[in-house]
Amino acid sequence: MKKVVLPLLMICLTSASLQAQDVQESGNSNDYNKWSIDVNGGFSKPANPMSPGYHSSAFNFFHADLGFRYMFNTKFGLKLDAGYDVMSEDDGPEFESKLLRTSLQGYANLGRIMEFESWTNRFNLLGHMGVGVGQLKNDDRFNGEDWIGNFLIGLTGQVRLSDRVSLNADFTMINSFSQQKTWDGGNYEPGSKQGFDSTLYNATVGLSIYLGKNEKHADWFVDDKSDELDALEQRIGEIETMMNDSDKDGVPDYLDAEPNSVTGVAVDTKGRAIDKNNNGVPDELESYLDQRTNEIKKEVSESNSNDLAGLINNGYVNVYFDFNSDKPNAQSVSGMNFLIKYLKQNPSVSADVVGYADEIGNSDYNKQLSQRRAENVKKILVDAGIDAGRLNIVGNGEDTSVNKDSKYARQVVRRVTFILK
């Protein structure tokens, strides 16, 4: 009897452990029904052992099964069931054996484990495994009963007919141990083993009737809270993305009207560079340019003629242009005045007038634009009294030395610079 009690105890402990591990993932147990009555009927097929010359029908009618199943949660449960089989001959000697058995089985809701709900709410799959005891009788071939132990494993397919009833089809394999008689009621052959060499198959269809006050049974219940959690995580992810600050100006991208503002330049609450005089140049950048102009003037006043030529040749004196314009902007007057004074003080010096454009637009067009900028600056110098023969026009096209995605950086390269000769 220990061979039966110990396995029963083990499967109960295993199912209880699975319940404890899974309770956090299965939703509130008050949201679904746990009990069901499973009624099945069908065929059985004893495979072995059989006495020499005896054969069993491929489909022995009948088999009946009644079970009471309790689900700890939406994924695991236990079932206590009883089964009855009648086995008879095929084309050999006549016999009729009867098997009455009971078992305790652990159930796994494979449909919930494998998330069938992602593609169907009509079909489901259960897996089950357990142990039990059986009583084999054949009044014609032996007196009394043969008590045998059973190990069962099977699969149950389900079709939900309503929230209270589902149609199921089950296939179960039963391996017996400690069996003293063959399925036809005979004795084992001398010297043969009586271990797990006895096999019986059951194929049945039936109904699962769900009990309880809730709308759905654990077989079909899906915790909507997990969907809500997924949606919440998605929303948090979207908020985190919205809070990114690409240009590090302290204004999140989703509120930033200028997400590519120059790092360090003061911005308003919408991420726009502060430009109080509305001249298109951020106040901080304009202040920096003014400061640099004052520094250049100071350096000029403290330098000799050679130092002045170095400042001009090194790009400290420039004429700047607005986007797609070949006319110098107002901020460029001081640079041209500086060059005019230097050329008048040094009548033997000539200069290359070199035009540039930013990278926005077609390269050929930008080449022409840089040429026109140089020509217009030359015209201003000539109008100011500089001999045209001392000025050589050079159109250098695009200046690629700055980040073309920054409109403020592009202002720096839209220029005409000078090289003295």
Image: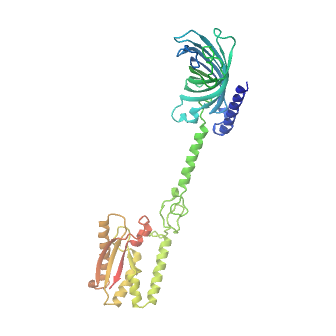
Q: Who is closer to the viewer here, 106 or 298? A: 106
Q: How is the image coloured?
A: rainbow
Which residue in the rendered view is the most extreme toward the front? 191
Q: Considering the image in quadrants, where does the C terminus appear?
A: bottom left
Q: How many marks?
A: 0
Q: Quadrant of residue 252?
A: bottom right
Q: In percent of the image, x 60 and y 40: which residue is there?
A: 226
Residue drawn at 45 percent across, 80 percent down: 293
Provide residue 245's location: percent of width, then percent of height: 53, 60
Residue 147 x/y as whole percent: 68, 18
Position of 164 with respect to 406 (left or right) is: right
Quadrant of the frame with the N terminus: top right
State the residue at coordinates (58%, 35%). 113
Position of residue 217 in the picture relative to residue 375 (left or right): right
Image vertical order of residue 189 relative to residue 248, above or below? above
On the question of residue 34 being in view, the answer is no
- Front residue of this view, candidates 327 and 285: 285
Q: Is residue 94 above or below residue 416?
A: above
Q: Is residue 393 visible?
A: yes
Residue 22 relative to residue 52: left or right: right
Q: Is residue 168 above or below residue 73?
A: above
Instruction: Give the x, y percent position of residue 2.
Output: 73, 26
Query: Left or right: where does residue 306 sit relative to residue 76?
Result: left
Q: Position of residue 228 (x, y in %)?
A: 59, 41
